[in-house]
Amino acid sequence: MQRILEALGWRQGSFVKPESVAKLIGDIDSTFTISANNLLVVASQSCDVASSQEEYIELSIVRLLSVEAFNKQYSHNRHPRILHIEAISNSSDEKVILELKAHEKIQIKKSLLEEFKPDSSINFLEGNLNQYIDWLAGRYKRPALPTKFDQLIASSDKKGKRKKIAKRANEHLTGIYVEIYPNRDIKDEETYSVNLLGIASNDQSIASATDALNEYADILKDAGMDVSVPKVGTEFKISVGTLRQYQRINFDYLSYEENNPIPPDTGI
């Protein structure tokens, strides 16, 4: 069976065309409403698609959106639960907007795909397949910052400045990262030392991104933390080694004990 799927071209990121979805609906055991107008995209890794040890294949439900419905807040993995991402229509050579929701995934038996070929009329734009994969994986590797760190910020940010910064930062930042010492809950007599790093959307956004990051630094200082001068750069100018020293601040998921999570941070 696995050789049949490989021969047909099924791999991670392959799309199931709407007419194939319509035929599969009766065999899909799902709590979600799946329309015959929806697409499906293979979420399982290509090696799992090919493996004889894997009986099932996992797919994400995909909705086609109008260009006007594109929401930047959901692009570039900014939001952990909703993704707006571009693909290319091979029939018209035009970009199309796709919407995926993290909880809308299904499993079907691989054998059900044997009678279908992947949808050749649509493909992810170059690099966007990796973006989709990273978005899927990101739900399982979000770091939790020390509870004390979150509590100090929450107690000093009574006016909700973080919400405003997060909303404005979506225009200029694809990620806010933090390096904390000590990276644990501290005692009353201890102080956090913090380095902040911002990933700007592009070179033109660096000035505005720096302003937003400086405002966030002020919140940390108000919480009694020692904060170094924030650094901002584009993802092409910040090394992987540097990024590994930091944890991403995800405003949608603070520590597990935070009672009032706020809207999502931007992310790569």
Image (cartoon, grey):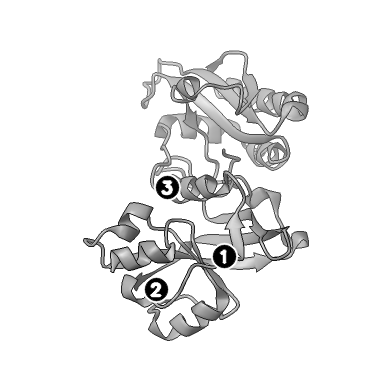
Where residue 13 appears, as percent x and y from the top left, is: 48, 57
Q: Is residue 95 left or right of residue 262?
A: right
What residue lies at 30% left-to-right and 64% top-to-bottom? 2
Residue picked out by circle 1: 120
Front: mark 1 or 3: 1
The mark nearer the N terminus, 1 or 2, is 2
In the image, residue 40 sits, relative to residue 67, either above or below, namely: below
Residue picked out by circle 2: 113
**Where is the C terminus found, in terms of image quarters?**
top right
Q: Is residue 150 left or right of residue 27?
A: right
Where residue 82 appears, as percent x and y from the top left, is: 56, 56
Distance between the Cα atoms at labels 1 and 3?
25 Å
Q: Is residue 232 left or right of residue 137?
A: right
What secondary structure is marked by label 3? helix
Q: Is residue 241 visible?
A: yes
What residue lies at 60% left-to-right and 40% top-to-bottom? 266
Where residue 22 appears, as percent x and y from the top left, is: 51, 83
Q: Hey, what amino acid is under mark 2?
A: Leu
Where residue 51 appears, as percent x and y from the top left, is: 27, 58
Q: Hey, what amino acid is under mark 1?
A: Ser
The mark nearer the N terminus, 1 or 3, is 1
What secondary structure is marked by label 1? loop
Distance between the Cα atoms at labels 1 and 2?
15 Å
81 or 128: which is nearer to us? 128
Distance between the Cα atoms at labels 2 and 3?
24 Å
55 or 249: which is nearer to us? 55
Residue picked out by circle 3: 137
In the image, residue 136 sits, relative to residue 188, either above or below, namely: below
